[in-house]
Image (cartoon, grey):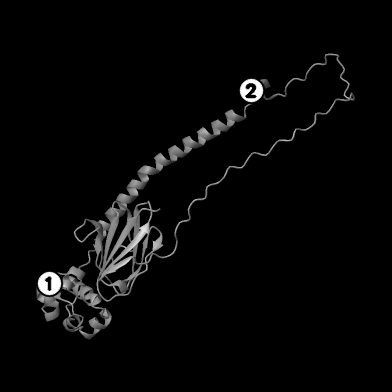
């Protein structure tokens, strides 16, 4: 690991910033001084994170140095005694038996209310449902054969159609890099909405991902994710800022970054990248 780090031109401070592992632990890993690491579990986890930040094959590393690496101590399993198991089962059965009569009582009351409702609805209240009385004959005879002048139909003019304003078409497709300054890439998206960002992290190689408000000293908008075992994708909804700063430890460990439904065009780079997403007003 030390040879790979020095060959890549990376310092201990840069590795500490990328992996979030303290420098003294990084030195202990390079020197094989595992007794200064906080337990065998954390030792193997630190070695895995450090190796992935250098682009090394973790499985091959574990297999090659299996004799030198600290072993994971087995965790004691807790088994309930037969008496405790029976006590828990009895307690559960007792709770169920207390609720059964109440549930049955509620069901019976519901069925009775339903039956009464349908009986009352179908009752015949005297003449309310009877057919209306027929009109009496007044003795006046109407000649139905007498010619009645027909009214000419009036042609109605069709309503005038109101002009429909066409909404401007939204831009689609990936967002290209607007400007570059070393490892800093700036993207601009024209929208009046707040920025909603999704960062999809690959399972391998693992990478560090951090999201802040605008600058290196800005507030964190999402927890830091040192590897793929954390939440995936990382989602920041409706950010209260016009500029997001996304720091990527290893760009190859990121599958894609989507902002307001549009994907960013990511550039391949072996070094840590700072990605700035800037919201500009749409014209």
Residue 49 lies, in percent from the top left, at 22, 73
Residue ID at (61%, 42%): 161
Residue 41, placed above or below residue 168: below
Question: SS class of the residue under badge 1?
Answer: helix
Q: Work out whether mark 1 precedes mark 2 in sequence or the reverse, and give the earlier one.
A: 1
* The quarter of the displayed image where residue 251 is located: bottom left
Residue 85, placed above or below residue 57: above
Camera-nearest residue between 185 and 49: 185
Residue 73, placed above or below residue 210: below
Residue 87 lies, in percent from the top left, at 27, 53
The disc placed on residue 103 is none
Residue ID at (37%, 45%): 97
Residue 115 lies, in percent from the top left, at 55, 34
What is the distance, in whole Å, between disc 1 and disc 2 at their CAs? 91 Å
Q: Nearer the viewer, mark 1 or mark 2?
A: 1
Residue that badge 2 annotates: 125
Residue 257, placed above or below residue 7: above
Outermost residue toward the right in this view: 145
Question: SS class of the residue under badge 2?
Answer: loop
Residue that badge 1 annotates: 23
Residue ID at (37%, 43%): 99
Is residue 233 at all visible to an observer of this figure?
Answer: no
């Amino acid at each position: 690991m030390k040879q790979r780090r020095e060959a890549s031109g990376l310092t201990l401070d840069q590795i500490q910033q990328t992996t979030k592992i303290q420098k003294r632990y990084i030195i202990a890993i390079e020197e094989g001084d595992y007794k200064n690491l906080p337990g065998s579990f954390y030792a193997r986890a630190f070695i895995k994170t450090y190796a992935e930040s250098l682009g090394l094959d973790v499985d091959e590393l574990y297999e090659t140095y299996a004799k030198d690496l600290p072993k994971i101590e087995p965790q004691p399993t807790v088994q309930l005694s037969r008496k405790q198991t029976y006590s828990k089962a009895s307690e559960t059965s007792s709770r169920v038996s207390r609720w059964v009569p109440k549930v049955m009582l509620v069901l019976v009351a519901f069925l009775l209310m339903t039956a009464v409702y349908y009986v009352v609805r179908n009752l015949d209240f005297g003449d309310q449902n009877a057919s209306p009385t027929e009109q009496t004959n007044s003795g006046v005879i109407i000649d139905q054969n007498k010619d009645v002048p027909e009214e000419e139909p009036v042609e109605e003019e069709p309503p005038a159609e109101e002009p429909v304003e066409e909404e401007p078409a939204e831009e689609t497709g990936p967002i290209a890099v607007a400007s570059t300054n070393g490892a800093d890439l700036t993207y601009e998206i024209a929208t009046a909405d707040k920025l909603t960002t999704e960062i999809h992290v690959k399972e391998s190689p693992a990478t560090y991902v951090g999201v802040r408000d605008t600058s290196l000293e800005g507030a964190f908008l999402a927890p830091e994710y040192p590897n793929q075992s954390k939440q995936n994708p990382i989602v920041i909804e409706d950010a209260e800022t016009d500029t997001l700063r996304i720091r990527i430890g290893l760009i190859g460990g990121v599958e894609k970054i989507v902002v307001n439904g549009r994907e960013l065009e990511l550039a391949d780079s072996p070094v840590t990248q700072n990605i700035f997403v800037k919201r500009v007003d749409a014209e």
